[in-house]
Image: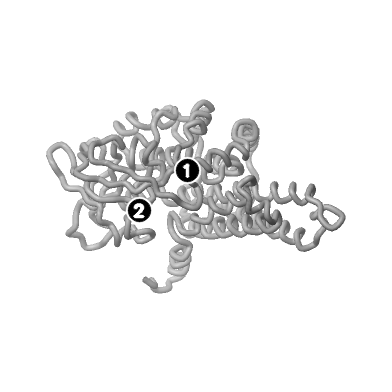
Amino acid sequence: MDFSLTEEQQAFKDIVHRWVEAECPKDWMRKLEADEENYPYALWDKLKEQGFFGIGIPEEWGGLGGDVVMQMIFAREFARTAGGLLWTWGLTSFGGAKTITAVGSEEQKQRWLPKMASGDLRVSLSMTEPDGGTDVLGAMKTHAEKVDGGWKLNGAKMWTTGAKAADRLLVLARTDANVEKKHHGLTMFFVDAKSPGITSSLLPKLGMRAMGSCEVHYEDVFVPDEDVLGTPGQAWYAMLPTLNNERIMVGAQCLGAIDGVLEDAVAYMKQRTAFGGIIGRFQILQHYIADIATWQKTTELLLYYVAQLQSEGKPCGIEANMLKMVATENAVKAADLGIQIMGGMGYSAETDMQRYWRDHRILRMTPISNEMVRNSIAESFGLPRSY
């Protein structure tokens, strides 16, 4: 097996790397992330100007084309400085475009994909229930009832990231309560975020702050039939094709963060002096670097393997879950050691090490908790469900 990049992929990686260095330096990312109440429109505009929202969207719909491997390459390079701000790009390019491409009608693709590719439409995912978390289905109280010409949507969602800046909200709601199984009777709505009856309030949080995660309330929100994605009542099956891509993007983000941690830690160890010389000569700190580098390579190999399987259309659900688990835990461990290496400066808001830790700690719990990931892996060996 050869997981090295092709010439085309390597050239794309080099282009993105140079662009990130020039346009998205870490000190600017720190300033954007610290401004919790304001969405990073300036970063969005840079991505739009460069055309990066078109990555992964078919050319026939105004995109640049490319498969999940190309998206992975971009996500890794961008996350090296952006950290959690990666989702300025990812929510629309992954959450919006991937969903519309997978389950949208031809008319819906024509209406929305070109706008996403050009950076003229922002998407936010509105999935998590106030009492939910990982138990999306069991906690589902948001519901919609059929009315003339559309649906009337009611309920509330938590952690709807970017809601205040969004043009469209991807909302999962129950449309049939009389079902045999919890994953039946669910419908996906692509809701106009400016619709009457929608209110959003900011949720202060530890990391990924400038992305603006919100609690969103839906009160008698009218959604026309043309904004229903896929077949009503069958949303769970429509979502399944996108789950592996989601875990691949999380893995790429975490690998990018590890890249950033490693380069910052090594640079600091080469210039910081203590006890008569640079701290890079201390064996224990060298061991920390060895651990981080090993986690980096482990994550990289698993990421490339899963992305290749996905791009070839091969089954990779269990492998994608393994990637999500390994990548998120490695990123947090690497950032924690990075803070230890830098001491007080690693804890300071003037450096990025603390931001790497804060932005990626949440990914051990979302979009699915690592405990649930472990359950699914164990179940793949024929063991009984534990919950």
In whole angstroms, how far apart are the C-alphas of marks 1 and 2?
Answer: 21 Å
Pointers 1 and 2 in contact (C-beta within 8 Å): no
Which numbered disc, 1 or 2, marks the residue that appears first in the sequence? Answer: 1
Report x, y in % for residue 209: 48, 46
Compared across the picture, whether 87 is left or right of 138 comes to right
Between residue 27 and residue 173, name the one nearer to us. 27
Which quadrant of the figure has residue 98?
Answer: top left
Secondary element at image label 1: loop
Which quadrant of the figure has residue 118?
Answer: top left
Res 279 label: none
Three-letter residue code for mark 1: Glu
Secondary element at image label 2: loop
Q: Residues within 10 Å of mark 2 (few under 14, many from 20)?
A: many
Three-letter residue code for mark 2: Thr
Depicted 293 relative to depicted 119: above or below:
below
Q: How did the renderer colour the structure?
A: one colour
Which quadrant of the figure has residue 151?
Answer: top left
Report x, y in % for residue 128: 35, 53
Identified at 71% across, 51% down, the residue is 265
Identified at 81% across, 55% down, the residue is 274
List the single residue furthest toward the left. 148
Q: Is residue 288 visible?
A: yes
Res 128 label: 2
Q: Is residue 304 visible?
A: no
Res 36 label: 1
Between residue 96 and residue 236, name the one nearer to us. 96
Report x, y in % for residue 367: 43, 54
Q: Residues within 10 Å of mark 1 (few under 14, many from 20)?
A: many
Q: Nearer the viewer, mark 1 or mark 2?
A: 1
Report x, y in % for residue 341: 71, 56
